[in-house]
Image (tube, coloured by chain):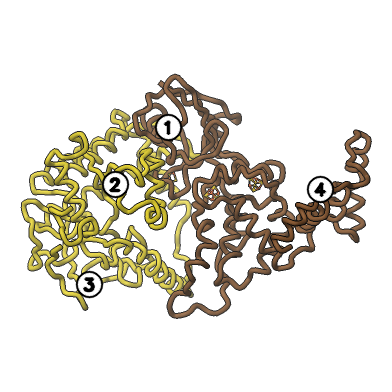
């Protein structure tokens, strides 16, 4: 890490560490030329590792058979947190536009939500904020909202029919494609073309590939049509949702011609506050995704250039 | 090729479970859950089980492999089964199967709820957090690591014969609050936990400690609650009296007085309870299994007394 962040070394923000790892692997310096590099924790010593990192050590032992007290851990970058999400205000109420118009009765908190505290890069342990602060605020908001209002006029039969129709649509597919292949190819393209390093060409290929996968998704093969704990059907619906979210990520990344936090464009390596100091709000219109901007509210800390 | 012999069950198709075998080349580095996913995604999409995090932290994927409960995502498949070998996968025990390896967790959650798994502090919530010293936190650190996987519940020997037993996970969760320096209901908690179905019904088999994938180790936590219960003077129940009688017998003579322990456990004034012991006693008598009427001390009883003295008892 001396080459990448000499003052902070491995404790630099994780987007910087992730880029350092990927650069080493891209330069062919991964373990045996593969997509992995070594993390050496041995200098910390057994006592410190056992006190501070017992879970990390156990993970290495269980998943890789590697004990980080005596050996180096093979590692690679991964998507570890969704910095974007369902837009909410600070009371966890979901909002629908840049003016903060609330969507009635819809609340979100946790990693699915985007309250706009993390910006382009969530720092270590700040995810606890979602649970400890916004979990509580969401609970209070929901209580306040639900007190004194009546159930809406839901027609149970109609709702059931609507869900069953969705299932039926999945069962009717012609079954010429494998959901497993689609899932694997989606993961592959998102990692290689929309991962640590992005550029215009890669993102365009990514979006086209995702379009193709969407088409194939509509022809997937179902084996389980039962109504008891059908895990296959929910995995299929989950995959459908993942494809939509992947589209949103890639489309917003293509539009954002700058680098900020976890989003790094090799063709636009600098941050561009003049044009992109805002959130992207993505809307699903009949003729594709539409992106609008929502300004970032800056109170105490002005954004500054990061140097480590 | 390794053989995965899987217990299948789908009540929509047939009421009885059956075993089905799948052959798979285990990819290097694959966990047992990875193998299950490969079976589901490439061989039979209807194969059902729970999973989510794939990193041993959500507690969803506990199943039985060759008869013992474990987290499928936490174990390297190659450590459990080699190519040319067979491994049997079954749903967790002591819970009703819903489909294949998915079981109904409702009784498990009901028991967790029974131990009031939330803080009952003395004062109203302060503006900021309530601080604990590292020493205070250490008392509840291990039980806080429980991920509610149910592996202990599945293999608990007491639960197999007594479904009213709270079970290892709920009792470990109970210790999380019995041992919490910020809780104000310690006495009430240990009183409730000393009722039938609570701490004293555990048979000390230690199976739950073997199965627990985390440092929660339920039986160790149960012993901690027992200690608190006795310290708080909650001794007016069969289990506590049994433990005290055990303790006194060893202290007096160096071994167990098997005539005295059942009587002391029931309570000397508990006529009904004592009468209930009679049939067992008579059956033991006729089978020639009665312990000697006159109880003898072991020869080294002085050493035993010295140990007790040293422990300041
Ligand atoms: S030690 Fe007690 S709680 Fe644990 S498995 Fe045995 S009987 Fe059950
Ligand atoms: S005590 Fe251990 S085995 Fe039992 S539910 Fe918790 S983590 Fe699982
Ligand atoms: S999948 Fe979460 S514990 Fe195994």
Q: Earlier in the sequence, mark 4 or mark 1?
A: 1
Chain under label 1? Answer: B
Marks 2 and 4, how far apart in space?
Answer: 64 Å
Marks 2 and 3, how far apart in space?
Answer: 28 Å
Chain rendered yellow: A
Q: Which residue is mark 1?
A: B77
Q: Which residue is mark 3?
A: A99
Marks 1 and 3, how far apart in space?
Answer: 53 Å
Instruction: State the residue in front, A171 or A292.
Output: A292
Q: Earlier in the sequence, mark 2 or mark 3?
A: 3
Work out whether B43 lies above or below B123: above
Q: Are marks 4 and 1 on the same chain?
A: yes
Q: Is A160 on the left-hand or right-hand side of A269?
A: right
Q: Is residue B203 visible?
A: yes
Work out whether B211 lies above or below A305: above
Front tag of 2 and 1: 1
Q: Which residue is mark 4?
A: B256
Residue count near mark 2 (Cα–Cα under 10 Å), binned few <14, some 14–19, many ≥20: some
Chain rendered brown: B
Front tag of 4 and 1: 4
Residue count near mark 1 (Cα–Cα under 10 Å), binned few <14, some 14–19, many ≥20: many
Q: Which residue is mark 2?
A: A242
Q: Are marks 2 and 4 on the same chain?
A: no
Q: Are marks 2 and 1 on the same chain?
A: no
Query: Residue B86: percent from the left, percent from the top?
Result: 49, 23
Q: Is residue A287 visible?
A: no
Q: Is B173 on the left-hand or right-hand side of A171?
A: right
Marks 4 and 1, how far apart in space?
Answer: 46 Å
């Amino acid at each position: 890490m001396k080459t990448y962040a000499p003052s902070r070394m491995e404790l630099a923000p994780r987007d910087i560490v992730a880029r350092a790892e990927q650069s080493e692997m891209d330069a062919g310096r991964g373990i045996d030329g593969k997509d992995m590099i070594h993390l050496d924790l041995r200098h910390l010593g057994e006592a410190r590792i056992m006190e501070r990192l017992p879970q990390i050590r156990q993970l290495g032992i269980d998943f890789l058979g590697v004990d980080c007290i005596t050996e180096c851990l093979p590692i690679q970058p991964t998507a570890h947190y969704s910095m974007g999400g369902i837009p909410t205000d600070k009371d966890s109420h979901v909002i629908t536009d840049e003016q903060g118009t609330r969507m009635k009765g819809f609340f979100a908190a946790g990693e699915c939500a985007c309250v706009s505290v993390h910006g382009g890069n969530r720092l270590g342990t700040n995810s606890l904020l979602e649970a400890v602060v916004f979990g509580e605020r969401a609970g209070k908001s929901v209580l306040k909202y639900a007190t004194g209002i009546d159930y809406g006029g839901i027609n149970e039969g109609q709702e059931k029919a609507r869900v069953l129709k969705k299932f039926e649509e999945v069962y009717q597919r012609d079954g010429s494609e494998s959901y497993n292949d689609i899932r694997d190819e989606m993961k592959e393209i998102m990692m290689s073309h929309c991962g640590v390093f992005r550029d215009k060409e890669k993102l365009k290929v990514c979006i086209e590939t995702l379009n193709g996968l969407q088409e194939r998704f509509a022809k997937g093969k179902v084996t389980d049509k039962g109504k008891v704990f059908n895990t296959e059907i929910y995995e299929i619906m989950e995959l459908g949702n993942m494809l939509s979210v992947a589209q949103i990520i890639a489309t917003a990344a293509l539009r954002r011609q700058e680098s900020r936090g976890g989003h790094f464009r090799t063709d636009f390596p600098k941050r561009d506050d003049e044009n992109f100091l805002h959130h992207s709000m993505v809307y699903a219109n009949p003729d594709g995704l539409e992106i609008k901007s929502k300004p970032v509210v800056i109170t105490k800390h002005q954004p500054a250039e990061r140097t480590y | 090729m390794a053989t995965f012999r899987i217990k299948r069950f789908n009540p929509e198709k047939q009421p009885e479970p059956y075993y089905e075998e799948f052959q798979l080349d285990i990819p290097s580095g694959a966990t047992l859950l990875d193998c299950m996913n490969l079976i589901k995604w490439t061989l039979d999409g209807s194969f059902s089980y729970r999973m989510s995090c794939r990193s041993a932290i959500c507690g969803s994927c506990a199943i039985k492999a060759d008869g013992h409960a474990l987290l499928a995502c936490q174990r390297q498949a190659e450590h459990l089964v080699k190519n040319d070998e067979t491994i049997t996968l079954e749903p967790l025990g002591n819970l009703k199967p819903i489909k294949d390896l998915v079981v109904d967790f409702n009784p498990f959650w009901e028991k967790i709820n029974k131990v009031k798994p939330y803080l009952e502090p003395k004062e109203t919530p302060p503006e900021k957090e309530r601080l604990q010293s590292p020493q205070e936190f250490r008392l509840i650190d291990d039980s806080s690591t429980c991920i509610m996987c149910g592996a202990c519940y599945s293999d608990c020997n007491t639960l197999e014969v007594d479904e009213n037993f709270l079970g290892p996970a709920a009792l470990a969760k109970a210790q999380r609050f019995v041992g919490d320096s910020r809780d104000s209901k310690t006495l009430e908690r240990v009183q409730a936990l000393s009722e039938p179905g609570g701490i004293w019904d555990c048979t000390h088999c230690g199976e739950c400690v073997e199965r627990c994938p985390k440092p929660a180790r339920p039986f160790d936590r149960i012993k901690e609650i027992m200690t608190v219960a006795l310290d708080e003077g909650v001794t007016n129940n069969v289990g506590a009296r049994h433990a005290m009688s055990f303790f006194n017998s060893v202290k007096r003579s160096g071994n167990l007085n098997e005539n005295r322990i059942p009587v002391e456990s029931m309570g000397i004034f508990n006529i009904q309870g004592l009468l209930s012991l009679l049939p067992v006693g008579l059956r033991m008598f006729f089978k020639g299994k009665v312990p000697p009427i006159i109880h003898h001390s072991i020869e080294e009883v002085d050493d035993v007394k010295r140990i007790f003295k040293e422990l300041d008892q």
